[in-house]
Image (cartoon, rainbow, N blue to C red):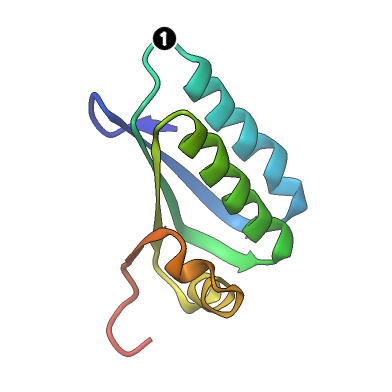
Amino acid sequence: MDRTGPDGARLTVTGEFTAEARRPVIREVTDLLLGADPPSRVLLDLHGVTFLNSAGLSTVVQLHRMLEGRGAELELLVGSTVVARPLQLSGLWHRFHVRDERPPGS
């Protein structure tokens, strides 16, 4: 987790975003929210994700709920179709603030 400024933090996920990745990601965000200076915005950087399944999507929903309950915003940074497609097919693409950083033509 990196602080992006006084009001934001960036959490980078790499590799397969599956059930195994859920616990460490939730723990990081929980620690952040319970800290002395919780952010008002969390950027979830998914550029390094090579596989995203329903457990990963569920984790994103859980993070959104956790942050929303604390008055904070979740922004997803997407850099590949591997991540974009499951978000689009599930309908979550339009539910979250998504920054689409895929190269043109992908």
From what the image shows, is residue 40 above or below residue 11?
Answer: above
Q: Quadrant of residue 1?
A: top left
Q: Is residue 84 above or below residue 31?
A: below
Residue at the left extreme of this rendering:
5
Residue furthest to the bottom in view is 105
Residue 72 x, y percent position in the rendering: 39, 35
Residue, disc 1: 36
Task: Give the residue type that dot 1 points to.
Answer: Ala
Q: Is residue 80 left or right of residue 62?
A: left
Q: Position of residue 4 (x, y in %)?
A: 27, 34
Inspect this view and state whether residue 17 appears.
no
Percent x, y of residue 28: 56, 30
Q: Residue at x 61, y 74 (%)?
A: 90
Total numbered badges shown on the rendered structure = 1
Query: Which residue occupies 66% across, 35% down?
Result: 24
Badge 1 element: loop
